[in-house]
Image (cartoon, rainbow, N blue to C red):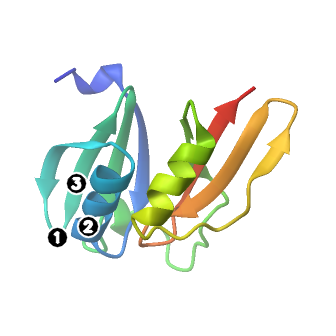
């Protein structure tokens, strides 16, 4: 296991830490570094460290009351977007958008069980 400073970290506030861990490890290839369910979990995929903070975690308590969620999302690169979409649909994962093509490649959005966005991206 690499030291935390070798990761790019993103914190997602989640309603249910175990459901989030299950989603990211089952469907998106993350592995668990630390799990203190139901409060917090730390999952990794490559250089991305995703901190999953439940409602009673210190990370969630630091957010001012009434702060709306942003339009941020993690961006996961894949070699074959169509195969990933098929695999995830077969696993029961709903998507939030259709495939969008642009000059850099193709992408589609899905959401974790708490509604945090994940972008799957296939470069040209």
Circle 1 packing at 10 Å, graded few (<14), some (14-19), many (20+), is some
- What residue appears at the point 61 percent right and 46 percent down from the top-left corner? 82
Secondary structure of the residue carrying numbered label 1: loop
Q: Are dots 3 and 1 in contact, CB under 8 Å?
A: no
Q: Where is residue 75 shown, x and y percent of the image?
A: 57, 41
Inter-mark Cα distance, 3 to 1: 8 Å
Q: Where is residue 102 shown, x and y percent of the image?
A: 86, 39
Q: In the figure, is residue 33 to the left or right of 112?
A: left
Inter-mark Cα distance, 2 to 3: 7 Å
Q: Nearer the viewer, residue 23 or 64?
A: 23
Q: Nearer the viewer, residue 104 or 63?
A: 104
Q: Are dots 1 and 2 in contact, CB under 8 Å?
A: yes
Quadrant where the C terminus is found in the figure? top right
What label does residue 94 carry, if any?
A: none
Would you name the residue on which mark 1 appears? 38
Secondary structure of the residue carrying numbered label 2: helix
Would you name the residue on which mark 2 appears? 17
Q: In the figure, is residue 101 to the left or right of 24?
A: right
- What residue appears at the point 74 percent right and 54 percent down from the top-left corner? 99
Q: Are dots 2 and 3 in contact, CB under 8 Å?
A: yes
- What residue appears at the point 56 percent right and 80 percent down from the top-left corner? 66
Q: Where is residue 48 shown, x and y percent of the image?
A: 40, 33
What label does residue 41 carry, if any?
A: 3
Instruction: Place residue 104 in its image quadrant.
Output: top right
Quadrant where the N terminus is found in the figure? top left
């Amino acid at each position: 296991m690499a030291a935390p400073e070798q990761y790019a970290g993103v914190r997602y506030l989640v309603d249910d830490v175990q459901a989030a861990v299950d989603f990211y490890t089952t469907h998106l290839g993350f592995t668990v570094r630390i799990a203190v369910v139901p409060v917090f979990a730390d999952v990794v995929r490559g250089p991305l460290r995703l901190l999953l903070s439940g409602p009673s975690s210190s990370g969630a308590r630091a957010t001012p009351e009434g702060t709306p969620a942003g339009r941020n999302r993690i961006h996961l690169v894949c070699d074959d977007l169509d195969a990933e979409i098929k695999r995830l649909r077969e696993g029961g994962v709903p998507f939030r958008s259709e495939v969008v093509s642009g000059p850099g490649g193709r992408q589609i959005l899905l959401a974790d069980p708490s509604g945090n966005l994940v972008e799957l991206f296939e470069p040209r």
